[in-house]
Amino acid sequence: MSVQQPPPAFAARARSVGGSPVREILALTERPGVISFAGGLPAPELFDADGLRAAYDAAFTAAPRRALQYSTTEGAPELREAVAARVTGRGLPTGPDDLLITTGSQQALTLITATLVEPGDVVLVENPTYLAALQCFGLAGARVVAVPCDENGILPEALEELVLREHPKLLYSVPTFQNPTGRTLPAARRAAVAEIAARLGLWLVEDDPYGELRYEGAEVPWVAAHPGAEDRTALLGSFSKIMAPGLRLGWLRAPQALRRAAVVAKQAADLHTSTVDQLAAAHYLAAADLDAHVARIRGAYRARRDALLAGLPGALPAGSVWNRPEGGMFVWARLPEGWDATAFLKSAVANDVAFVPGAPFFSTSPDPRTLRLSFTTHTPQEIAEGLRRLSRAAG
């Protein structure tokens, strides 16, 4: 019998980028009885299952052959029309041809990265930032540089200094109810970011999966809506948080040339997003009152956020601090001097409660005392019980 040789090695990018600690923690906490503040999961009992079932029935009734057939890469025209109307209604004039339907907004980020980023290119991110974005940029071979931030997000003066020094390809940000911190970038800073990008030559990638989940305060216009951002902003949106994440439906609004390049990248990735899911979503948007459904979600999540905030003083170690997000899914906390959130998590899991340590969300110089708590998955009563367990874990 001949000696077999091992197959060639994986690509360097696959060897250099680790898995998601959040996903690993979710797997750890799936056992019955654990109350998890770890995952950014919508509340399943709030899904409009009946309305979505009716929408799928309508998609098959109206055009079963079309629903089951290949479709165009850009997306079903009726869904793009519906998305364009919603984006326009939120203050950013948009037509169907300005949009590309994607398999979740995560795919939109992957397509933009494939289109813009070459190995060695500098990508700027908030500090901390969305973990899957760090994975995406890492797989592309980018050099990720963190922009200094405060409790309100990006510091424009620091951004300008970095752009001049590092000559980055793009800035990636989640300006509204950011993951992981829940913070929202003020309107004046958004205008400054747009001006800097226009003056110094920079692509902007604005990720907005949480923007419709506002519980208090005034709406803040997208960065994409500010002067200077018009020809250089890729705006990413999603139905995951307002309809259902299992649909895997998102959208990309981008200037024509960038959008066309993303279409080509998508053709290489999956040809097109599921036809039947797109048609069902279009039927749902035509027949159901999504705004009323979002209002119900907001009411439930507001109560859950308030329950978490009310219980944190008795649950976290004395001297801990945290923010009060105006919307979204997350509260960001920092333990007192001498504490480590990863070590604290071990004690928490032993008490059947979980959260996500903050360190993995930093591209450099992680703060080991930080942690993220998601409040959307559990009822106020379950949140109260989870916090009692967290208090026991804190000793």
Image (cartoon, helix red, strand yellow):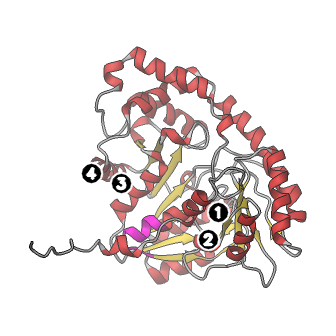
Q: Earlier in the sequence, mark 1 or mark 3?
A: 1
Which-is-in-front pick, marks 2 and 3? 2
Circle 4 Cα neighbour tier, 10 Å, few/some/many (<14 / 14–19 / ≥20): few
Which residue sits at x=50%, y=35%? 83
Residue at mark 4: 268
Q: Earlier in the sequence, mark 4 or mark 2?
A: 2
Residue 99 quadrant:
top left
Residue 119 quadrant:
bottom left
| Position in image of residue 277 (x %, y %) | 44, 32
| Position in image of residue 111 (x %, y %) | 37, 55
> Which corner quadrant holds the N terminus?
bottom left
Q: In this rendering, is residue 161 above or below 308?
A: below
Residue at mark 2: 128
Residue at mark 3: 258
Mark pair 4, 2: CA separation? 31 Å
Which residue sits at x=56%, y=51%? 225
Residue 180: mark in rendering: 1
Q: Earlier in the sequence, mark 2 or mark 3?
A: 2
Assess whether mark 3 and mark 2 are in contact (beta carbons under 8 angstroms).
no
Q: Is label 2 in a helix, a strand or a loop?
A: loop
Where does the magenta region start and end? 135-143
Q: Is label 4 in a helix, a strand or a loop?
A: helix
Q: Earlier in the sequence, mark 1 or mark 2?
A: 2
Q: Nearer the viewer, residue 351 or 96?
A: 351
